[in-house]
Amino acid sequence: MSSNSIVDIVKELIGEEAAKIISILLEKEETSDDELIQRTGMKINNLRKILYQLFDNNFISYRREKDKEIGWYKYYWRINPTAINILVNSIRKKVLSKLKDRLEYEMNNIFFACPEHQKNRYTFEEAMELNFQCPYCGKKLDNIKNDEIITILKIKISEIEKKLKT
């Protein structure tokens, strides 16, 4: 899985600022709070809130070290690749299921469309109810082939299945 895909998923699930943090954490093994503040320009409270959200979702983990001079703990954050892979695979499985459902729908139906309104497809049953006439202009509905859609769905399904195996 590419770094951009991971960032996009985090952006979708938690938000833009979380995605910014994840992209920084992907650059090296560990990153401190201080470096994250410098690189993101966030205030410490906001940064910690987002880090804890990422931690609660198991996207990141941390190590803490006591600063001997001031006695405070310093946190070092890192990506949790196992949890991210689990999430990504979960999303892939959902997409795969939807693609397989769509493939089955495409393979088990005959479709019709108006030569003028190609974007409106009708199953055989729907076309029969319409008397094989376009509800917009009254023209005869023609049988249309969906071989290209079926081919594309099969390719996408195959790609996702390969990714899930690795």
Image: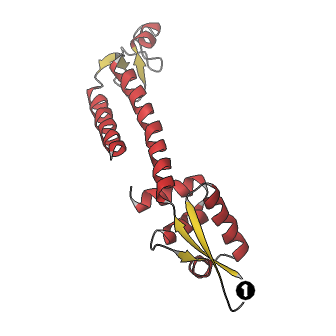
The answer to which quarter of the image holds residue 35 is bottom right
**Residue 117, visible in the rendered structure:** no
Please, which residue is most extreme toward the bottom here? 69
Q: How dense is the environment of label 1, judged by Cα within 10 Å: few (below 14), some, or many (20 and up)?
A: few
Question: What kind of element bears circle 1?
Answer: loop
Image location (x, y in percent) of residue 154: 29, 32
**Residue of label 1:** 71
Which quadrant would residue 55 be assigned to in this image?
bottom right
* Rendering coords of residue 157 (x, y %): 33, 36
Q: Nearer the viewer, residue 8 or 33?
A: 33
Q: Residue at x 36, y 14 (%)?
A: 140
| The image quarter in which residue 134 lies | top left
Q: Where is the N terminus found, in terms of image quarters?
A: bottom left
Residue 19 horizontal/vertical position (percent): 55, 63
Query: Along the horizontal axis of the image, is 116 left or right of 82?
Result: left
How many marks on residues? 1
What residue appears at the point 37 percent right and 22 percent down from the top-left corner? 104
Q: Taking 61 as reference, is 146 above or below it?
A: above
Against 64, residue 22 (above or below) is above
Name which residue lies at 61% across and 60% down: 54
The vertical placement of 81 against 122, above or below, is: below
Q: Would you say residue 106 is visible in this rendering? A: yes
Query: What amino acid type is highlighted by mark number 1?
Result: Gly
Give the side of residue 166 with respect to residue 63, left or right: left
Q: Indicate how the structure is coloured in the image.
A: secondary structure
* Looking at the image, residue 24 lies above or below residue 147: below
Image coords of residue 4 (percent x, y): 43, 61
Residue sitting at x 61%, y 81%:
34
Q: Is residue 114 left or right of residue 51?
A: left
